[in-house]
């Protein structure tokens, strides 16, 4: 089944404790992206990747890191989480950078930073 | 910055009625998409309309695009309780970048 898999689904952590949210897609998509969703603000893009080893900042990249060493994986890293990073996070992918016409989303990761 | 802004923020209708949601955006676009989200789950793609198209249909969905007004509307006809969800417009700006920008969404509640 074609899908984008995020883990974990729920995560509670404390300020300053490094964490990684994993994202994997099995559709051979070139383009992958991370979004955070906050009430009243919709989805805001954190980072995106056009292909392996090619990443760029979205609208809200501060406090986050990403890497794209393999085509299928695009982990989101919070080196030193803070409470303002409490949010619902989504990973998404699409076929190619030139055809970001249909994003496929993971089920989301609800992160709470205490 | 928010590219798309949906209107209304929330909409409550009876089953069988039509639901209309609007989206306005700020910059020129390559395409505009509508997505649906059920209760905090991942978004699901509904329909895409390109900048050179004015109207598109898919089942009970009708999307219009007015590039002169930088606006789009999503019409769901003969709504069902199962249509209860949040609906988001997303734009692919014609700026040479690789971002897809989402609005804040419209929450639709369909009463049985």
Image (cartoon, rainbow, N blue to C red):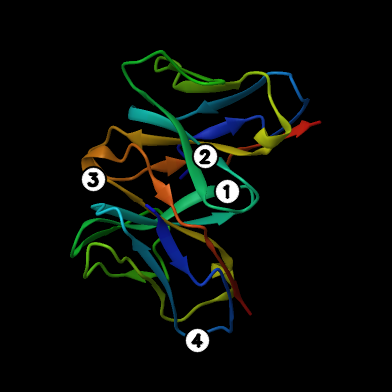
Q: Are marks 4 and 2 on the same chain?
A: no
Chain letter behind tag 4: A
State the separation of the CA atoms marked 4 and 3. Answer: 34 Å
Q: Are marks 2 and 3 on the same chain?
A: no
Percent x, y for residue A13? 58, 82
Residue visible at 76% across and 25% down in the picture: B15
Q: Secondary structure at mark 4?
A: loop
Q: Residues within 10 Å of mark 2 (few under 14, many from 20)?
A: many
Q: Secondary structure at mark 3?
A: loop
State the separation of the CA atoms marked 4 and 2. Answer: 31 Å
- Rendered image: mark on residue A41: 1
State the separation of the CA atoms marked 3 and 1. Answer: 26 Å
Q: Secondary structure at mark 1?
A: loop
Residue with the mark numbered 4: A17
Residue with the mark numbered 3: A96
- Rendered image: mark on residue A22: none
Chain letter behind tag 2: B
Residue visible at 33% across and 36% down in the picture: A101
Percent x, y for residue B96? 22, 38
């Amino acid at each position: 089944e074609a899908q984008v898999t995020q883990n974990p689904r729920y995560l509670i952590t404390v300020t300053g404790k490094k964490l990684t949210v994993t994202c994997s897609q099995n559709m051979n998509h070139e383009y992958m992206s991370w979004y955070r969703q906050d009430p009243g603000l919709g989805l805001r893009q954190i980072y995106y990747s056009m292909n392996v080893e090619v990443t760029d900042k979205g609208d809200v990249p501060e406090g986050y890191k990403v890497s794209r060493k393999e085509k299928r994986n695009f982990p989101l890293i919070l080196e030193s989480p803070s409470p303002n990073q409490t949010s619902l996070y989504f990973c998404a992918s699409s076929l190619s950078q030139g055809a970001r016409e249909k994003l496929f989303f993971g089920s989301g990761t609800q992160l709470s930073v205490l | 910055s928010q590219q798309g802004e949906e209107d209304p923020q929330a909409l409550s209708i009876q089953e069988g009625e039509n639901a209309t949601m609007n989206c306005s955006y700020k910059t020129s676009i390559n395409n505009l998409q509508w997505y649906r989200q059920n209760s905090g789950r991942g978004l699901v793609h509904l329909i895409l309309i390109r900048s050179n198209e004015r109207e598109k249909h898919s089942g009970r969905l009708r999307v219009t695009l007015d590039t002169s007004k930088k606006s789009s509307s999503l019409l769901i006809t003969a709504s069902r309780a199962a249509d209860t969800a949040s609906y988001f417009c997303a734009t692919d700006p014609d700026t040479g970048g690789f971002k897809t920008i989402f609005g804040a969404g419209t929450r639709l509640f369909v009463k049985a």
